[in-house]
Image (cartoon, helix red, strand yellow):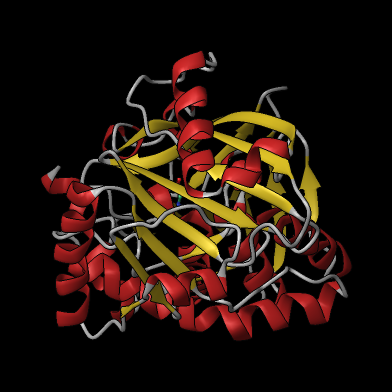
């Protein structure tokens, strides 16, 4: 295959995972980002949770998420083999808890839908829950185990990707991209903040929620993505406090707690449609912490480490937009929304194929940029 020069706009998980696959295929890749690996990918919890993130209306997306979850085993091993740095993939499964009877009823309905789609949801007795997670409170009216929903450590992943790209010779330009402009010949070029122009064979646009800040791109592209604010908390506990990912409904609100091997617990996350508002309000933070304490009382003794605000890239239909833009040299990898880490194993694979072949792979046919025309 001919070696291509590829400019990747955006150094989050979407851009870096695609850059990794392309660099491994010996293409000359340059990543443009003023602060790589410090956006939504840094805040994320790292859940690979297609089943528990399943929504009643999103079956094609759910299938893509399940496929990507399967790809992660090999993809994680590939990244680790190049970087020598683990990404913290853990396969203990996810425990789902309904805190009060209405929460239990909602989760029972969801589990029926999940089972119809072939997802195994195993109900847990109070005793079984206590055996798996002795420090949980309760009794809760609903508890179940989903073995297929797992996690990796998103921060380790991003460090590992950066190191892998470094050893593959990928260039990093730590500057903002002010424009991606159409040239006279119909191709697109990258314009940096300092006015410098770069004309690669292919431009991959993967800047997460910030695509709207880049001028020159077709309007249909820039208006397709909105920022969806998430506030997320990290606390330091002893590693014995929690071993499995917990996803819960507490008085109708969704909460997750994701334990890392060193005892850190990631607690998240709010979902707010307030544009690029970086303020931290007390109420959502207090709610998340009090809900976490209802599920896992010992968390009250943990050390508070961090509160972070970042923005998920949500598209007009909350599904990704991936592939070639019209017949140009512009490729998109946008709209990962709540599933950036999970979807990146699959979307990086198929967007790399799209760049190499110029064709939309069948696996992402439904998520192509042609959807932008109808939006
Ligand atoms: N995937 C979890 C979140 O977006 O909060």
Q: Is residue 245 above or below residue 270?
A: below
> In the rendered image, is residue 219 in sight?
yes
Image x and y of residue 216, in percent: 43, 30
Query: Is 108 positioned to the left or the right of 126 in the image?
Result: left
Quadrant of residue 176 in the image? top right
> In the rendered image, is residue 176 in sight?
no
Image x and y of residue 4, in percent: 64, 69
Q: How many marks?
A: 0
Q: Is residue 92 above or below residue 314?
A: below
Query: Is 292 positioned to the left or the right of 272 in the image?
Result: right
Q: Nearer the viewer, residue 212 or 98?
A: 98
Residue located at (88% from left, 68% from top): 167
Residue located at (56% from left, 43% from top): 267
Image x and y of residue 305, in percent: 75, 33
Image x and y of residue 33, in percent: 69, 39
Residue located at (45% from left, 67% from top): 95
Q: Nearer the viewer, residue 71 or 182?
A: 71
Q: Is residue 374 above or below residue 244?
A: above
Quadrant of residue 105 in the image? bottom left
The quadrant of the picture occupied by the N terminus is bottom right
Q: Nearer the viewer, residue 231 or 340?
A: 231
The quadrant of the picture occupied by the C terminus is top left
Q: Is residue 191 above or below residue 264?
A: above
Query: Is 243 positioned to the left or the right of 189 in the image?
Result: right
Query: Is 198 positioned to the left or the right of 372 in the image?
Result: right
């Amino acid at each position: 295959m001919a070696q291509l020069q590829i400019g990747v706009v955006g150094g989050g998980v979407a851009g870096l995972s695609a850059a990794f696959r392309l660099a491994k295929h010996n293409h000359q890749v340059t990543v443009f980002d003023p602060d790589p690996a410090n956006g939504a990918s840094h805040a994320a919890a790292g859940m690979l949770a297609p089943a528990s993130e399943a929504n009643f209306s999103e079956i094609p997306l759910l299938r893509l998420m399940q496929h990507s979850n399967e790809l992660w085993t090999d993809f994680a091993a590939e990244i680790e083999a190049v970087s020598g740095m683990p990404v913290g993939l853990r396969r203990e499964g996810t425990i789902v808890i309904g805190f009060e009877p209405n929460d239990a009823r909602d989760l029972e309905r969801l589990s029926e839908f999940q089972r119809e789609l072939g997802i195994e949801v195993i109900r847990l007795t109070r005793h079984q829950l206590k055996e798996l997670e002795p420090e949980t409170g309760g009794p809760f009216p609903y508890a179940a185990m989903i073995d297929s929903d797992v996690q990796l450590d998103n921060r380790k992943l991003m460090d590992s990707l950066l190191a892998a790209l470094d050893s593959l010779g990928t260039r990093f330009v730590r500057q903002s991209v002010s424009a991606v402009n159409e040239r006279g010949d119909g191709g697109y070029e990258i314009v940096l903040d300092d006015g410098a122009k770069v004309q690669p064979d292919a431009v991959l646009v993967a800047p997460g929620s910030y695509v709207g800040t880049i001028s020159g791109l077709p309007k249909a592209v820039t208006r397709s993505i909105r920022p969806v604010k998430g506030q997320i908390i990290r606390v330091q506990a002893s590693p014995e406090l929690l071993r499995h990912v917990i996803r819960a409904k507490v008085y109708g609100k969704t909460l997750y707690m994701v334990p890392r091997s060193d005892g850190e617990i990631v607690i998240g996350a709010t979902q707010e449609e307030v544009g690029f508002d970086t303020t931290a309000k007390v109420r959502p933070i207090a709610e998340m912490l009090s809900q976490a304490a209802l599920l896992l009382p010992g968390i009250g003794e943990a050390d508070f480490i961090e509160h972070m605000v970042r923005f998920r890239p949500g598209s007009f239909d909350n599904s990704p937009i991936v592939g070639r833009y019209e017949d140009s040299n512009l490729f998109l990898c946008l709209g990962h929304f709540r599933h950036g880490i999970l979807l990146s194993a699959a979307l990086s694979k198929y967007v790399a194929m799209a760049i190499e072949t110029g064709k939309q792979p069948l696996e992402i046919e439904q998520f192509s940029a042609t959807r932008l025309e109808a939006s």
